[in-house]
Amino acid sequence: MFDALTDRLGNVFRGLRGRGRITEENVSEVMREIRTALLEADVNLEVAREFCDEVQQKAVGAEIIKTLKPAEVMVKIVHDELVSLMGPVDPRVPFVSPGPTVLLMAGLQGSGKTTTCGKLAKMLMSKAKRPLLVAADLKRPAAIDQLEVLGEQIDCPVYTERGHQNPVKVCRNGIKHARKTDRDLVILDTAGRLAIDDELMDEIAKVARTTTPHQVYLVLDAMTGQDAVHTAKAFNDRLELDACILTKFDSDTRGGAALSVRKVTGKPIKFVGVGEKLDALEEFHPDRIAGRILGMGDVLTLVEQAQRQFDEKEQSQLEAKMAKGKFTLDDFLTHLRKMKNMGSMKDLMKKIPGMGDAAGDMDFDENEIVRMEAVIQSMTLKERENPKIIDTSRRRRIARGSGSDPADVSQLVKSFEPMRKMMQAMSGQSLMQRMRMGTQFSKMMAGGGMPKMKGSTSSTRRVMNKKDRRKRRRKK
Ligand SMILES: Nc1nc2c(ncn2[C@@H]2O[C@H](COP(=O)(O)OP(=O)(O)O)[C@@H](O)[C@H]2O)c(=O)[nH]1
Ligand SMILES: [Mg+2]
């Protein structure tokens, strides 16, 4: 799997090695080659096009860190884009309580449904689950035997009803049987066809409607390439799919299905089958797959290190400015953006022992950050360096540019001075002290009133209160 793609991409990156810089021109050239490589790997046309557009945009806009070569930067961008193409994924199976949790397996005949039922049961048994396999493929008598044999091999009970033709009934009875026999997981193995047809779709849709499974997994044969993607789309239109399982990942197919399914259906791949044996089922991890496709683990590590050093350098420059009280609105903007990128800082803090309470107090209003960002962005560099020059006409211009009130602009400028002082005070503190001050800081930004500190003037307090009132009004 992926060997050909790995070779092709390797050539593309080698071609970049001699270049000194990434320019718009050579990126376009490289992108053409990457696109060809993806199409040859049987990636969906539309997916390949979008992928290349994304990579191109990121490459042209990339801040090239001096210690890195263009080829290295490109590898990293392509890697990250591959990861986001296939993700995010969650390889866990969610369980309900009280059970049993019901999983429905759908797919075409020969895709590997029955085998995957056995593999999944085995995998979950190793996590202390007690599955019951239900043989609901009544089209071929041999299908029931096949599941029974698998069940025996892994020591898992199999529910069967021979001699009638109603899969809905078998599934229902199977679930009842699971309750009676204290099984906490039911895996329904359903019938497939050689191709998608209305009868198959009607039957599986009916089974899904009447058994209301907690999860519906579509089993896809990776060897069928783009056909697998079309199949996924057709099933996804009729069923509430939760995820796909891609089988025969051990074969030497080109891998296009793995790269396209997520984008085309919006449903992630959860597991991959990597052999005929019952332990040949693996969790699907996009970063590992991307790493395998690019086969350049060392380059990726290098880029990540350089990125980290770059971030650290930026951070320490910021700290130095903070310490000297030379922190400008422009720096503040950088800082705001970083905070936004950090995303769920609150969750992060909760994990630090003793920080749980402080995290609860920390209520960052995302919208507030966005508004402040807009205001600062509408200022000229000079105004950001020295907000004192902002007079009435400048204030009006900034407000217009940022879609806000002149009063919002004044508020930001007025509260910036105490903020700057607080930053200065914070710069010499320990992490714990900083966190505590950070809480005050965030309250202040959220308009919760000024904390008692040097530098907070009555006028800023008044502005905050005014805003408070506005907020209250909004709530009503
Ligand atoms: N190499 C390989 N073969 C597989 C994999 N999964 C299933 N198979 C084989 O594919 C064939 C069809 O599988 P089966 O489970 O009967 O498919 P079903 O018709 O969808 O139930 C069998 O010969 C399996 O051994 C896999 O991950 N790798
Ligand atoms: Mg089968």
Image (cartoon, rainbow, N blue to C red):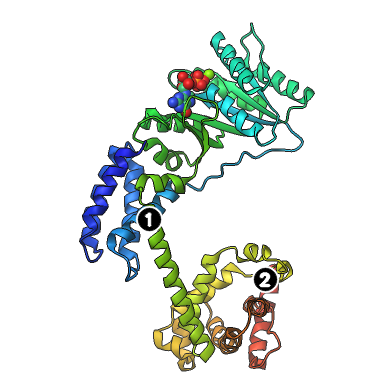
State the image coordinates of residue 392 (x, y, percent, origin top left). Answer: 48, 91
Name which quarter of the figure residue 129 lies in: top right
Residue at horizontal 60%, vertical 41%? 92
347 sits left or right of 332 in the view: right
Of the pair 352 and 237, the residue shown nearer to us? 352
Q: Is mark 2 within 8 Å of ligand 1?
A: no
The kind of secondary structure element at disc 1 is helix
Residue 261 can be seen, yes or no? yes
Q: Mark 1 highlights which residue?
A: 298
Compared with residue 141, is residue 302 higher up or lower down, i.e. above or below?
A: below
Q: Does 135 sit left or right of 378 as displayed?
A: right
In space, the residues marked 1 and 2 are separated at their CA atoms by 39 Å
**Residue type at the position of mark 1:** Asp
- x, y (%) of residue 65? 34, 69
Quadrant of the image containing the N terminus: top left
- Mark closest to the chain's N terminus, 1 or 2: 1
Given the image, on which type of amino acid does mark 2 rest? Answer: Met
Name the one closer to the observer, 155 or 381.
155
Per the image, the residue denoted by label 2 is 362
Name the one closer to the observer, 171 or 311. 311
Disc 2 secondary structure class: loop
Q: How many marks?
A: 2
Q: Residue at x 28, y 62 (%)?
A: 70
Residue 416 point in image, percent of width and height: 56, 86
